[in-house]
Amino acid sequence: MSARAQLFDRRQRGTAIALGAANHALFGVGVGCMMLGLYTGMQSGAGPLQGPAAWLANAVLALQFPFLHSYLLTPAGRARLARLAPPGLGRELSTTTYAMAASLQLLVVFGLWSPSGVVWWEPAGALRTAFGLAFGASWLLLAKSMWDAGLDVQSGALGWLSVARGRRPAYGPFPQHGLFRVCRQPVYLAFALTLWTGPAWTPDHLAIALVWAAYCVLGARVKERRYLAAFGAPFRAYQRRVGFWWPTPLRDGAPRLEG
């Protein structure tokens, strides 16, 4: 057995594989629930509440995602996530436990949402087809941006796959290829687009779109502060070269990047 494989014993590697399977199952179900919820104007939730109680509960559901999602990236939040992992694997499985937490949050929001039952507007015919195509395109853009950002990190695969292979996770530099050549925050931009392209418009849909779109801007700003602290001058130069949210046209003479 190589020295690399001896970093983790058989039990630890098996545990990592089991957590990886659970993580990707949760990820798929969570994203599926989000897609259904946004497409139906947040009318697919199973929450039983009505009136003021429903709005209060829904507000808590909507707000817990951005706050907890951001908190888990702080030193205190990372420490809590590490304690949830099996002993000795907290740091190595951090991307996996973080992705699992995010998937559970999506399940809670879209599964427990109490629908108002009020539909303001829903397109029909060709217009509905157009909205459906825009909605699908926004999800494809999100998938592409996550791929460019490093799908192993975004999906939580980096952690469990590294342990299963007997090595520690290796994180690369901040992404500058693919969509990141023309936009610094394509993941947040695409996520916001998924919020606004669903065809059914209800008070519920508007509420979740407003709250989470604001998070897409503020969360991206917080992320850039972390990147500046981690990467310094190279990231500052990247900020000067590429737009924050809106795509920046590639210019002649700009540095050629892979992707």
Image (cartoon, rainbow, N blue to C red):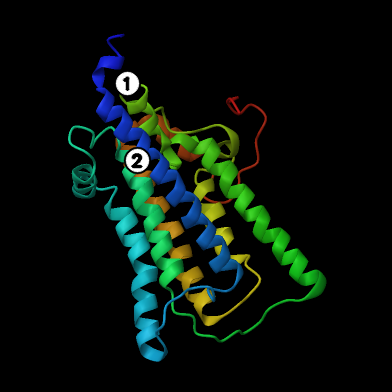
Residue found farthest to the top: 2
90 with respect to 26 (left or right) = left
Label 1 sits on a secondary structure element that is: loop
Q: Which residue is mark 1?
A: 166
User: Could you say where residue 169 lies in the image, as x and y percent from the top left?
Assistant: 34, 27
Q: Identify the image quadrant of residue 129.
A: bottom right
Location of the C terminus by quadrant is top right
Count of numbered circles in the view: 2
Where does the N terminus fall, quadrant-wise? top left
Q: Which residue reaches farthest bottom? A: 51
Sequence-wise, the earlier of marks 2 and 1 is 2
Residue at position x 46%, y 67% in the image: 110
Q: Position of residue 73 (x, y in %)?
A: 29, 47
Is residue 10 depicted above or below 219 in this figure? above
Q: CA distance from mark 2 to mark 1?
A: 15 Å
Label 2: element kind = helix
Q: Residue at 63% x, 65% y: name it.
A: 197
Taking the spot 34% from the left edge, 40% from the top edge, the residue there is 19
Residue 19 is tagged as: 2
Type of residue at label 1? Answer: Gly
* Residue 170 can be seen in this image: no
Left or right of 122 on screen, residue 226: left
Position of 189 relative to 208 (above/below) = above
